[in-house]
Image (cartoon, rainbow, N blue to C red):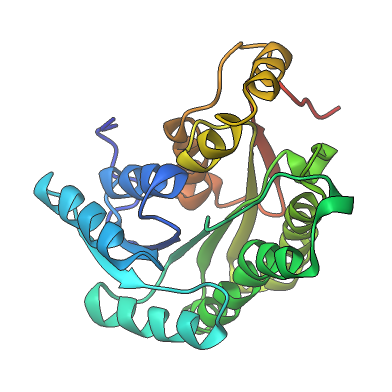
Amino acid sequence: MTTGISRLAGKVALVTGAAQGIGQAIAARLAEEGAKVAIADIQEESAASTATELKSAGLEASAIKLDVTSLDSAVNAVVAVERALGPVDILVNNAGWDKLEPFVDSTPETWDRVIAINFRGVLNCCKAVIPGMQARGGGKIVSISSDAGRVGSLGEAVYSGCKAGIIAFSKTLARELARNKINVNVVCPGPTDTALLRGVMDKQPKVLEAMLRAVPMRRLGQPQDLAGAVAFFASPDADYATGQVISISGGLTMAG
């Protein structure tokens, strides 16, 4: 959906995991609001396809290979973005992965992968981007956590721990970087209709039915539902907001 607003004109945004799902919707929204967007993903072909789609709509985008589990890859991706689009003004940490299972049935190999993608990936990308933002005197970091990190979620113990870690990490970064005019905020999706969720829930339809009954709005979130909140935090409208966490969940969770 084109907003007709150019709040992000001239800004460069790096969105991780942007080849599909929530990341793709975020990248499109930021581009529609005027940003030059780096579609950063480990899936090179899908990233290129997304970038081509945005460019065909008259928007500025470039596909960048990025494995968030590697600090070297994150550093190289930032260099590639600077060459293609310019210095990174906005970082959106969106890349994620999960495997739904009880903790007692999970393995250290699964823990390592979940932690590497969901938590260490955020650390790597922030480490790669922040020095440049500090040198330029400003920037916006928006990390995608989850309501699972706020209230827990059955079958997602390690994932929930990672997402809770993103919240605490972001609040600390917000304190450390405020003097550099770098805003750090968090968006927490509730159950969202993505390929990852469908892949899990197609095998457990009763879990999906129970989930829908628990959401006051009686539907799954759509990737576009998250994009607007990210665009707000990335924009000048949120210049005085930092260390904040917002849940986009159809009312599934409500902070007191």
Q: Is residue 18 above or below residue 182?
A: above
Task: Report the quarter where the C terminus lies.
Answer: top right
Residue 241 in sight = no
Taking the spot 79% from the left edge, 69% from the top edge, the residue there is 108
Task: Report the quarter where the N terminus lies.
Answer: top left
Residue 57 picture location, percent across and down: 13, 44
Q: Is residue 45 above or below residue 159?
A: below
Residue reaching furthest to the right? 104
Residue 161 picture location, percent across and down: 81, 55
Is 27 on the left or on the right of 4, as rendered?
A: right
Q: Is residue 95 above or below residue 147?
A: below
Total count of labels: 0
The one of 130 and 222 positioned closer to us in this rendering: 222
Residue 184 picture location, percent across and down: 63, 59
Taking the spot 50% from the left edge, 45% from the top edge, the residue there is 230
Residue 7 picture location, percent across and down: 35, 46
The one of 61 and 115 positioned closer to us in this rendering: 115
Is 102 on the left or on the right of 247, as rendered?
A: right
User: Residue 17 falls in which quadrant of the image?
Assistant: bottom left
Taking the spot 50% from the left edge, 31% from the top edge, the residue there is 193
User: Residue 192 falls in which quadrant of the image?
Assistant: top right
Residue 236 in sight = yes
Taking the spot 41% from the left edge, 86% from the top edge, the residue there is 76
Is 161 on the left or on the right of 245, as rendered?
A: right
